[in-house]
């Protein structure tokens, strides 16, 4: 396991532990839990864990400030700095701070990662 992987795992474990603590605190609020209560608490905890892990992985994926190639025209994009953005994912809304790129040819901005965005090959 790489050092970055260990750090990423520690972040993810910490996020999961916080969700579990919240789940247990919610369970203690009621004197007696029904099976439906338990299901609701666990469903919510699962959703929270998925959201946290999605945000953590997406943030880690976008850490590199490498040169990027425009998915529309294939030209080199300009790095415009880091920006914060709320992104709707399959697991919920996630707050991300990542590099923002602008294509002077297409006049479009990109907030990676996005499936069609390529990293510029070495030596180009």
Image: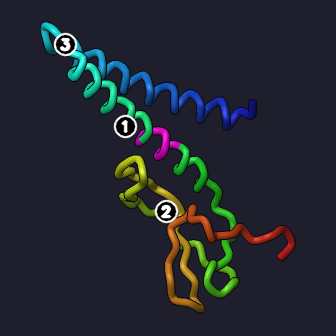
- Does the magenta portion include 80? no
- Label 1 sits on a secondary structure element that is helix
Quickly name the residue at label 1: 47
In the image, which disc is placed on residue 60?
none
Question: What residue range appears in magenta?
Answer: 51-56
What's the CA distance linking mark 1 and mark 2? 28 Å
Residue reaching furthest to the right = 123
In the image, which disc is placed on residue 82?
2
Residue at x-position 83% and y-position 76%:
124
In the depicted structure, whether residue 122 falls above or below residue 58: below
Residue reaching furthest to the left = 31
Quickly name the residue at label 3: 33
In the depicted structure, whether residue 70 falls above or below residue 61: below
- Label 3 sits on a secondary structure element that is loop
Q: Main secondary structure of the magenta part?
A: helix
Residue 123, percent from left and from top: 86, 72
Which numbered disc, 3 or 2, marks the residue closer to the eye? 3
In the depicted structure, whether residue 35 falls above or below residue 97: above
Residue 48, percent from left and from top: 36, 36
Residue reaching furthest to the top = 31
Which numbered disc, 1 or 2, marks the residue closer to the eye? 1
Graded by Cα atoms within 10 Å as few (under 14), some (14 to 19) or many (20 or more), the crowding at tag 3 reads few
Residue reaching furthest to the front = 35
- Label 2 sits on a secondary structure element that is strand
- Does the magenta portion include 54? yes
């Amino acid at each position: 396991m790489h050092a970055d992987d260990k750090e990423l795992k520690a972040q993810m474990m910490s996020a999961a532990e916080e969700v579990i603590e919240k789940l247990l605190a919610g369970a203690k609020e009621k004197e007696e839990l029904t099976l439906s209560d338990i299901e609701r608490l666990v469903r919510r905890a699962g959703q929270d864990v998925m959201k946290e892990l999605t945000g953590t992985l997406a943030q880690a994926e976008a850490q590199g400030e490498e040169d990027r190639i425009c998915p529309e025209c294939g030209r080199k994009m300009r790095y415009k700095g880091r920006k914060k953005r709320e992104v709707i994912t399959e697991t919920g809304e996630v707050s991300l701070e990542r590099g923002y790129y602008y294509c002077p040819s297409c006049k479009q901005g990109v907030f990676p990662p996005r499936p069609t965005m390529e990293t510029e090959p070495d030596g180009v």
